[in-house]
Image (cartoon, rainbow, N blue to C red):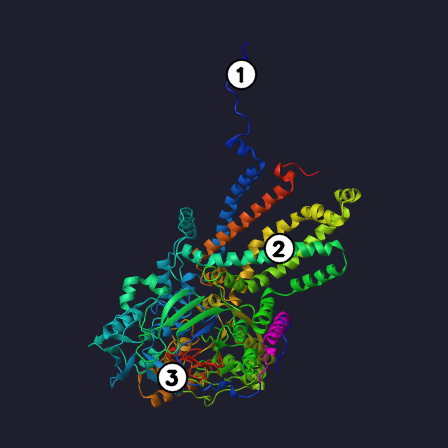
């Protein structure tokens, strides 16, 4: 049961206005209730045509630092632009399979202390320079040595070229998650050394050169990026499209209206639940709900009161009714999860043995034993997160917990973490491979400033899980880590949220008309495979 | 007989050449206003600099994001010069600015003049269009409404104005897109076409955003001007005199009351200009216009001080110039202002 918060009256009024605007926008578009939204049009891909892709201003639509892989801190959000321009060494494709693209394969050493990457022969950058091992090794070293937070944090000892088409990455410790981490990192987008040296870093950020399926025509930072087909792309007959334009737009509502007006064909990050439903009901669109890889987690700061006391943490576990939030607030859209893996990720397990589920009586009893509990619950200013914290506030109050909620912009959130005075935060944790990208260590490592735990045993469990190349072994180790988090009552998990992709019916391609596992938030679309099927 | 007075060189007539120009009341007014603008603009830069620097976080933490370690943040702070004392940073920026060096964006390392050159024309065109739309409609509608107070036209304009004033411009923008782009498909829902690419395309790309910004302005200006005209028509002696002399009602309204009612409108328009940047932030985002509004917001989020300072300085200058133009228009409309005589 979600209690009403009098202070949210204005917000509710705003919601009503927004909902009315949304209804005006979509109501007249008809549609049916069928579940065919995720079905592709099935037409044969055709060469030619152009697409306009919209990106929300708060995430993919921001590339303030430009598009150089060594300096673009927003790389994960800007993956569409990066993979279109630079291509990818490896792509994450259907069924969570790693597909060699600019690379043709990889091989781990038996002890997982090195990995060889074999490059495709005869490939050229769009400036005509050869795509060879020396350039790829230079690129990975450049990314690893940059002072950008986009720099991968692998335990790398060296990256060297071996012959013309093999790159060897050596590690200081066994690292079986190397290739899984590579596809999530800026190292996967190889820049042209020749162009970078010729243009200089500043100009390269604005008009970068790679060996991807498209070349940059114009780039207005965080506003509009126009790309044209690379006729010399390594894969014959690809890309299908002649032109690709990315435009930043104000948000879900504006993006869907522009698509209805026929002025854009793709929007890949619809996160407003009501608009996802309405887009699904519109027969002009194909709406693909991706499977989440990063569930929401309630981080509890175990280094400061009140959550340095296990009883207080347990009270939060018992007072949290995730199922009610999932079903009533989000209409069963997202799966409940008890660990740091989402249904779209590797090593997903929904349940964790011994996990403490909602039990109001136990929560009340614990709060009583503690002599009361006052909590500040923070989150970032994102609609789904803010709605969830308001629901949690009312649930926790029923258990006798006094709750103050805070919403931060990114700067405020970082400050709150750095102050070390925070108590609880609703955040997301994990990624497709828990060891890859920002990963799960970001929320749990003793060394991370954004972690609520300092536990050497947990650090060891995560390090061990990343050390082997045996996925079955890794799965077992991650399950052990999830169980340990649950047993210590370090952080209740909520649900696995993922945005949806909406495309017009004539658009075909993996990650757009067909689901792909999201690497971080949304899937990395292989744009060379995307086509605009003519409507007959 | 000689006339010594004729033999002497003729004294230079007072008021010819530059000396006369200096004595021109209008030019004196402009000179005074421009001089007064200097401390105003300086104050704006100082306050902006202080505000940006007291906000939580700095460019280093913002640009590096949540994953940054303290060492990375410290290194970037050092590289960007954020460790230097506030006063020193401000004085350095001010000195550079005076010599025409507006610096580089912390985020992209693009030069600030390049950013302004890329973005400002779009916003300037949008705002000019919005003002044009609003003012072109305001005067005839206010005149028609005030011709017969509480008549049908007045009531319709009142209803329209109240609607426009109560609807937020982002909601209006979405409704406009729905009607004109989605349903009628006569105007684009997003994007900007430069005049170089197509003049017609350029106008079409700006119609909806300009109406979204201009319509609430039109509503506000119409109510203001209507009330002012009515006040003139009902209470001023010169109107009674004109009527007594047999001047027709339309002529009294347009030739006599309207010019006297324009002062309030001119003042509000000039003051409004600075506040409209808030509207452009949202509207430019909704319509995917590559203007300065979203760039300013992004710069604020990234604590990109040089970009913020320069954009705010340009906006402040525009407001100062707009107010100067308003002053000149007062002087054109009212000789008492021109000659600095007190109003009777």
The residue sitting at 38% across, 86% down in the picture is A96
What's the CA distance linking mark 1 and mark 3?
102 Å
Q: Give the left or right position of residue A225, taking residue B242 as reference.
A: left
Which chain does tag 3 point to?
A
Mark 1 and mark 3 on one chain: no
Q: Which mark is residue B6?
A: 1
Task: Please report contact status of discs 1 and 3: CB closer than 8 Å, yes or no.
Answer: no
Judged by depth in the image, the label closer to the viewer, 1 or 3, is 1
Which secondary structure dominates the residues rendered in magenta? Answer: helix
- Disc 1 chain ID: B
Q: Which residue is under mark 2?
A: B135
Is A111 rendered above or below residue B119?
below
Badge 1 marks a residue whose secondary structure is helix
Q: Quadrant of residue A119?
A: bottom left
Magenta-drawn segment: A9-31
Disc assigned to residue A93: 3
Residue B168 image offset from top left, x and y in percent: 61, 65
């Amino acid at each position: 049961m979600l209690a009403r918060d009098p202070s949210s009256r204005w917000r509710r009024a705003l919601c009503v206005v927004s909902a009315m605007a949304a209804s005006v926008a979509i109501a007249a578009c008809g549609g049916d209730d069928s579940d065919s939204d995720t079905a592709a049009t099935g037409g044969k891909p055709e060469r030619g045509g152009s697409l306009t892709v919209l990106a929300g201003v708060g995430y993919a639509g921001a590339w303030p630092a430009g598009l150089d892989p060594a300096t673009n801190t927003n790389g994960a959000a800007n993956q569409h632009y990066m993979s279109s321009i630079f291509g990818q060494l490896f792509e994450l494709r259907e069924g969570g399979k790693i597909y060699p693209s600019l690379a043709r394969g990889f091989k781990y050493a038996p002890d997982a202390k090195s990995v060889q990457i074999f490059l495709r022969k005869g490939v050229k950058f769009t400036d005509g320079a050869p795509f060879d091992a020396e350039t790829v090794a230079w690129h990975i070293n450049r990314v690893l040595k940059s002072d950008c937070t986009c720099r991968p944090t692998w335990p790398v000892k060296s990256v060297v070229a071996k012959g013309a088409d093999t790159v060897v990455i050596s590690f200081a410790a066994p690292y079986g998650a190397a290739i899984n981490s590579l596809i999530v990192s800026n190292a996967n987008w190889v820049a042209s050394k020749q162009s970078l040296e010729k243009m200089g870093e500043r100009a390269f950020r604005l008009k970068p050169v790679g060996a991807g399926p498209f070349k940059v025509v114009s780039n207005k930072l965080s506003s509009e990026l126009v790309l044209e087909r690379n006729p010399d792309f390594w894969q014959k007959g690809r890309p299908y499209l002649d032109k690709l334009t990315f435009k930043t737009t104000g948000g879900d509502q504006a993006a869907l209206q522009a698509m209805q007006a026929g002025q854009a064909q793709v929007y890949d990050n619809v996160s407003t639940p009501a608009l996802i439903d309405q887009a699904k009901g519109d027969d002009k669109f194909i709406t693909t709900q991706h499977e989440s890889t990063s569930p929401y987690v309630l981080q509890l700061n175990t280094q400061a009161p009140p959550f340095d006391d296990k009883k207080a943490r347990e009270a939060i576990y018992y007072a949290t009714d995730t199922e009610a939030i999932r079903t009533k607030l989000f209409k069963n859209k997202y799966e409940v999860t008890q660990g740091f893996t989402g249904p779209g990720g590797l090593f997903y397990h929904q349940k964790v043995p011994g996990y403490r589920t909602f039990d109001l009586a136990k929560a009340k009893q614990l709060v009583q034993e503690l002599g009361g509990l006052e909590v500040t619950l923070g989150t970032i200013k994102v609609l789904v997160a803010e709605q969830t914290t308001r629901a949690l506030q009312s649930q926790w109050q029923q258990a006798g917990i006094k709750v103050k909620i805070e919403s931060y912009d990114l700067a405020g959130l970082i400050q709150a973490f750095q102050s070390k005075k925070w108590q609880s935060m609703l955040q997301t944790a994990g990624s497709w491979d828990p060891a890859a990208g920002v990963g799960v260590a970001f929320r749990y490592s003793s060394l991370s400033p954004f972690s609520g735990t300092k536990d050497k045993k947990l650090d060891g469990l995560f390090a061990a899980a990343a050390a082997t190349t045996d996925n079955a072994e890794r799965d077992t180790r991650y399950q052990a880590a999830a169980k340990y988090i649950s047993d210590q009552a370090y952080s209740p998990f909520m649900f696995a949220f993922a945005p949806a992709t909406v495309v017009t019916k004539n658009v075909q391609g993996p990650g757009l008309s067909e689901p792909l596992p999201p690497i971080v938030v949304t899937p990395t679309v292989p744009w060379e495979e995307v086509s605009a099927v003519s409507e007959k | 007989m000689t006339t010594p007075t004729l033999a002497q060189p003729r004294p230079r007539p007072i008021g010819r050449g530059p000396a006369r120009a200096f004595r021109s009341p209008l030019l004196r007014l402009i000179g005074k206003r421009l001089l007064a603008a200097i401390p105003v603009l300086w104050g704006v830069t100082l306050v902006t600099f202080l505000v940006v620097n007291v906000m939580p976080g700095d460019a280093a933490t913002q640009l590096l994001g949540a994953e940054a370690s303290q060492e990375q943040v410290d290194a970037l702070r050092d590289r960007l010069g954020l460790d230097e004392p506030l006063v020193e940073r401000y004085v350095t920026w001010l000195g550079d600015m005076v010599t025409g060096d507006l610096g580089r964006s912390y985020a992209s390392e693009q030069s600030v003049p390049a950013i302004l050159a890329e973005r400002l024309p779009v916003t300037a065109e949008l705002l000019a269009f919005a003002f044009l739309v609003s003012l072109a409609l305001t005067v005839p509608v206010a005149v028609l409404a005030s011709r017969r107070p509480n008549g049908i036209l007045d009531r319709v304009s009142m209803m329209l104005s109240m609607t426009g004033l109560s609807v937020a411009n982002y909601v209006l923008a979405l409704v406009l897109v729905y009607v004109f782009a989605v349903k009628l498909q006569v105007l684009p829902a997003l994007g900007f076409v430069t005049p170089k690419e197509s003049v017609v395309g350029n106008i079409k790309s700006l119609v909806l955003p300009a109406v979204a910004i201009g319509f609430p302005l039109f509503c506000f200006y119409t109510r203001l001007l209507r009330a002012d005209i009515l006040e003139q028509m009902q209470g001023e002696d010169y109107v009674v005199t004109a009527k007594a002399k047999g001047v027709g009602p339309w002529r009294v309204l347009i030739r006599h009351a309207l010019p006297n009612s324009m002062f309030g409108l001119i003042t509000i328009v000039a003051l409004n200009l600075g506040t409209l940047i808030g509207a452009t932030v949202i509207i430019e985002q909704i319509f995917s216009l590559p203007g300065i509004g979203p760039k300013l917001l992004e710069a604020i989020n990234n604590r990109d001080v040089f970009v913020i300072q320069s954009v705010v300085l340009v906006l402040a200058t525009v407001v100062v110039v707009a107010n100067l133009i308003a002053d000149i228009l007062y002087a054109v409309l009212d000789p008492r202002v021109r000659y600095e005589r007190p109003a009777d």
